[in-house]
Image (cartoon, rainbow, N blue to C red):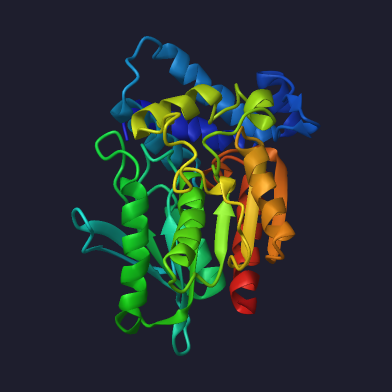
Amino acid sequence: MSVQDRIGKALARGQRRLPKAALKRRHGEPPTIDSHTLDLQIYAYASLIQAARARNAGTEVRPQTIRDGFDTMVAIGSGDPVAEVSVHDRTIPGPARDIPVRLYHPPRTSGRSAAIVWYHQGGGVIGGLDTDHTLCTMLSDACQAVVISVDYRLAPEHPFPADVVDSLAAYQWVIDHADGLGIDPARVAVAGTSQGGKLSAVVCQERRREGLAAPVAQILLYPGLDATWQGGSRDTMAEAWPLSEATLQFFALMGGITDNNADDRRASPGLETNLTGQPPALIVTAGFDPLRSEGDAYAAALQDANVSVVHRCEGELTHSFTVMGAVSKAAQKATERIASDAAALLADA
């Protein structure tokens, strides 16, 4: 992290300690859209990030530029990981190349553990093993589960469906190596944020199509589930931060998602009409997120198919709020709720 980024980190995290009146004097009143009022601390954080971007206006928009900016945002905004969780990296065989994974082992276990195969956010273009690191430690600790975070291939270097192929292969590897991992193969869930939420839904659906045992549960956090979606929050939150409609279009372009394949269920699992028998789900959406409507709709569709669903919208928060715990108390509390709900979901599965 550069000196400028370290200064930005100190400023952003320092704002979390300021009283509301001071934040409002500095940044103004947060917006209210669709009856949701944006969390003041996230609004202040977004103001700092956007001011920094304005100073760098004119920089060519390339995948690496977006990746670097996102990695900085994650480093600044993420809360502290759970220190007691054991973490180590390795690679596993993949269909095209070895797949890097990160293993999280809980501090207290008795017998074989449950497991969560984790897929990170980033639109299929950005992100990696560090992106959701803090949340993975929280889930491992709260659920007493081994978490296996998957560094699937990214576009544009590896366009759709490379991310799906790697995700399915990694899930199967976990099942095949349950003994060595110390996990119960009948208690393996899938989970992820944004693109990772989509990949989790795809893994559940694809394994059913292939006649294979489905995950025991699915945890979908502000997921993008329908590349064909129009209207709703895609319109009202088109200018939202940190995810806008323009960014979604950029990810689709880089990933090779076009009118010709957007309705492929591996790109848009939200279009699947036969959801009977899908695993129990935890689906959490965010108020200030263009993906909110499609996540809410998928939760309703699963419920209509008699699938057990825990669903809520964190109305005052934005997309990617789980990497903002260090700059927003509301984001930290919402992330803790996710860990608690995930633990209850796995306990009941």
Image coordinates of residue 258 in percent, x first then y, are 42, 29
Image coordinates of residue 332 in percent, x first then y, are 61, 50
For the residue pair 8 and 331, the one nearer the viewer reads as: 331
Q: Return the residue found at the far right.
A: 35
- Left or right of 155: which side holds 140? right
Q: Quadrant of the N terminus?
A: top left
Q: Which residue is at a point 42% across and 41% down the rendered structure image?
A: 75
Q: Which residue is at a point 65% across and 34% down the rendered structure image?
A: 41
Figure check: 308 above or below 100: below
Q: Return the residue found at the far left.
A: 97
Q: Which residue is at a point 67% across and 38% down the rendered structure image?
A: 293
Q: Which residue is at a point 66% across and 20% down the rendered structure image?
A: 27
**Picture quarter containing residue 203?**
bottom left
**Picture quarter containing residue 40?**
top right
Q: Quadrant of the C terminus?
A: bottom right
- Left or right of 12: which side holds 234? right
For the residue pair 286 and 303, the one nearer the viewer reads as: 303
Can the viewer see residue 79 in this picture?
A: no
- Left or right of 265: which side holds 23? right
Image coordinates of residue 77 in percent, x first then y, are 50, 40
Q: How many marks?
A: 0
Figure check: 302 above or below 154: below
Can the viewer see residue 173 in this picture?
A: yes
For the residue pair 16 and 57, the one nearer the viewer reads as: 57
Q: Return the residue found at the far bottom.
A: 111
Image coordinates of residue 57 in percent, x first then y, are 41, 11
